[in-house]
Amino acid sequence: VAASEMFYKLLIIAFLAVSLYGTPSDGQKKKETLLSEKVSQMMEWTSKRAVIRLNGEKFRRLIRAPPRNYSVIIMFTALQPQRQCGVCKQADEEFQILANSWRYSSAFTNRIFFGMVDFDEGSDVFQMLNMNSAPTFINFPAKGKPKPADTYELQVRGFAAEQLARWVADRTDVHIRVIRPPNYAGPLMLGLLLAFIGSLAYLRRNNLEFLFNKNVWAFSALSFVLIMTSGQMWNHIRGPPYAHKNPNTGQVSYIHGSSQAQFVAETHIVLLFNAAVTLGMVLLHEAATSDLDIGKRKIMCVAGIGLVVLFFSWLLSIFRAKYHGYPYSFLE
Amino acid sequence: ASVSGFLSLLSFTILFLAWLAGFSSRLFAVIRFESIIHEFDPWFNYRSTHHLSTNGFYEFLNWFDERAWYPLGRIVGGTVYPGLMVTAGLIHYILNLLHVTVHIRDVCVFLAPVFSGLTAVSTFLLTRELWNQGAGLLAACFIAIVPGYISRSVAGSFDNEGIAIFALQFTYYLWVKSVKTGSVFWTIGCCLSYFYMVSAWGGYVFIINLIPLHVFVLLLMQRFSRRLYIAYSTFYIVGLVLSMQIPFVGFQPIRTSEHMAAAGVFALLQAYAFLQYLKDRLTRQEFQTLFFLGVSLAAGVVFLTLTKPSLPPLLRYAKIHIPIIASVSEHQPTTWVSFFFDLHILVCTFPAGLWFCIKNINDERVFVALYAISAVYFAGVMVRLMLTLTPVVCMLSAIAFSSVFEHYLGDDMKRENPIKQHPFYPVKNSSVYSKLIVTMLMLMLLMMFAVHCTWVTSNAYSSPSVVLASYNHDGSRNILDDFREAYYWLRQNTDEHARVMSWWDYGYQIAGMANRTTLVDNNTWNNSHIALVGKAMSSNESAAYEIMKSLDVDYVLIIFGGVIGYSGDDINKFLWMVRIAEGEHPKDIRESDYFTPQGEFRVDKAGSPTLLNCLMYKMSYYRFGEMQLDFRTPPGFDRTRNAEIGNKDIRLKHLEEAFTSEHWLVRIYRVKKQENRQALDHKLRNIAAKQKYTSKKVLPSRFH
């Protein structure tokens, strides 16, 4: 609000100047037309894309050069695939969400714009600002030069659109409600799955035996249970990395060292081990009850013993590695 | 007859031993420390039980506790599940009636271990209904010692879950029994047990959703029967009426979405039974028209029920990042390590039990399969709900082990004849060696399980957390009794109506042990009040003083672990206070102010100035800069965070140190009263010296 008031005040002063002196100074008029030109230029671009792509020339003219009554939030980034900046892509997505939320919100005004400078299009800008890391978010305020607080603390606050919006509100007093486009992937997948099952049932409508097949049901129940007990829900909520690669030695560790956290790879291993022990128990039971001949049953029995013993001892040793000070082991 | 007599004697002995083993493995804390109430929530339960036993039941129901949530107070009678208090109070009353004079505290301390025995018995009964006697006995032994259940039921952990798991298992047993028999007698028993569960724990919602789910799935599987109809209709009506008798539950069962599934299934069952009735009376053509009408109606009802699903709230609960919920560690999702830690071998074998159950399905095994699947989902979402998973894991694992033992442990010579006639188990002459190996292996696994359970119970779940212990290099033990020292100091040395401000974790303990008024406590119902306390803790001293003045605070209590290296202290919880305060007062408190520019939370010189000058920091480290703990470290070295503190010269203006416990674990500050007249912050008015008039008269001569 303060900035726009300021703008109106300026206008009024300019008007007064015009009416008092009759002939406006040439510089003043030029400045104003330049400003309105710039604003309309920015508006036009914003209406095309919520985030304006800037190169060195545009950056200097629209952001660096003085007459300006709008703030610009600029993301400095390196999106070209050869730069291999994974974070940039994620940050870009969040930034786009923020810019679009602002672009299509009812409170949209020309007080603030969103722009981006890609390293490969405006490396001179990077040099000019003495910048050597991407992504970086900087607010160029309507008045004066960016202060230290106008550089977003990416390391501290992360690049979630909500956090960015709070920072923007902090710096420019423009409150943006972040509206994420609804994620249709989940329902779509579910719909496809249902359609698939439905069509399968329709194709086999004369033979719906499989619905009464206990093995199918038992197998799906077991899969669900195994998925849950191996901590996939934790993965779903916390989103850990698949495995950790030590940047110095290049060694990949699949097991997280602490008992408070886990990698995705680790949970897959545990799922496998749990399933193997379960299978071992079932085999032991089958070996004693099935109608097969004695030789096959013997193999089943031995396999059952092997599965239970081996996989349980491995499971225990992974647990020991994670839970420091656990005293017991099996077959070690 | 003698065989069956021998069998029942054996079962009785095994159950008794399981009870005994379960009871004694829960006594670690009592033997190491003393008969003491643990942790946080149990202190509130103990305090209200004490109130109940001294003032009677009606006084308890009408109890308005003005010592909590100052200045709001709390209506205790209407905001608790009274089952726990009433159970303990009743036992105390009966024992005193018999002239066994025990203190109410001892009743409270030993209540959970005693109930664990009852849980074992009801698990035995339920498993026997599902599978057979042998599996039941194994299940009883498992549940007696499994850490997932012990974690909530050690001696001294006087909490709702301790008795609720018994009620849960017993309700399920009676439900299975009533579905099997279709008798109203068993169903009414089930309702009474359900009533007890509702009075004891909020987890009753699990029952009121699982039983309808069971009925619904049975309908889908075309296993409708009159037994089912009688059991569920009776259960729903009587259970509903009974559950509404608990003041805290009130009209929730007919209002909230968690209970709607039960109502929907009730309607569906009625419709289904009605259709069955019509089918017997009408011709095929008439029936088909009616059937389609009915099905579409029923589908509508079910759809309405399912559009308000009862399960997603839990998931949302875990996913939405509400600081006050996220700050509680037991609301986190569960890692595989926690599953293994709490269940050990059972976690890998219970899927096998589930497999056997589904392969040999019948009405009650449908129930146990649904129980397993829903409980495992909830346990995955929230660590705390491991508790509801544990019983079903014990039962299914027992089924798995029992079906293996059945074939490898039996004596061939004796069993050969009866088994030959049995169609399912044709006798197999598997070699003696394989039998021996498998049996030894299974016994070995079970032994490891028992050892693991004892180790976990002893090391992880038996700390009262009110009294701490530290071990020296030679194995000798130091007891750190700072908490009680400080609480008793408050009790003895402060005014009876003094108001103590602390973080909410310690509210119940202050109320229970120090008997003083608190501002916030573990019943975190009022987020804005908590945020205000968080704001006071994270503001600078003068801003905090304004808040404390407005809340009439007399004392401030904080926990500081820097001297002994206790990691659960207030500085480590501090960021949560900031976050919760920020949620309500975003203009005044900002989390980023408490971090260094690099995004670290540090208490040393590099820490952010806001942190180094906030009230919590000042109170924690007041006079700590003068203290040198040993010769290798500089003065003011914090052992918890391994850092030399950044602000050693701390001066307090509005507070003064009132008490610091032996190991500095608890520090209490007195809030100074305002001075009579506020000191002016500008200079006193200076009256300009006027020109002095001196008489020019010559003084009378007599003065000369």
Image (spheres, grey):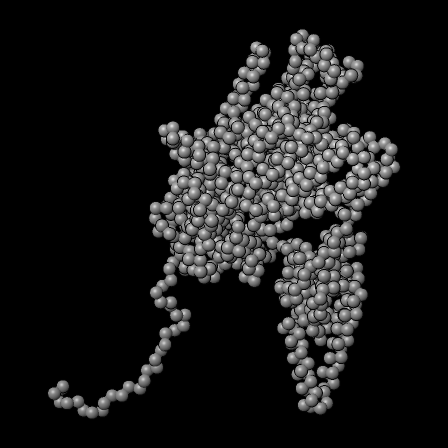
* Residue B674 position (above or below residue A29): above
Q: Is residue B513 above or below residue B354?
A: below
Q: Position of residue B237 (x, y in %)?
A: 60, 39
Residue B410 shown left or right of residue B21 in the figure: right
Query: Percent x, y for residue B144?
Result: 55, 27
- The one nearer the camera, A217 or B400, is A217
- Give the image location of residue B57, x and y in percent: 43, 40
Residue closest to the far left: B702
- Tell me which residue sits at (34%, 48%) in the image: B493
Residue A307 visible to an observer of this rendering: no
* Above or below for A72 versus B126: below
Q: Quadrant of the C terminus of chain B?
A: bottom left
Q: How many numbered discs sit on the rendered protein?
A: 0
Q: Between residue A248 and residue B416, name the one nearer to us.
A: B416
Q: Which of the 4 quarters of the picture holds residue A140? A: bottom right
Q: Residue at x 61, y 35 (%)?
A: B235
Q: Position of residue B309 (x, y in %)?
A: 68, 45
Q: Is residue B80 visible?
A: yes
Give the quarter of the image for residue B105.
top left
Q: Identify the residue at image location x=38%, y=40%.
A: B54
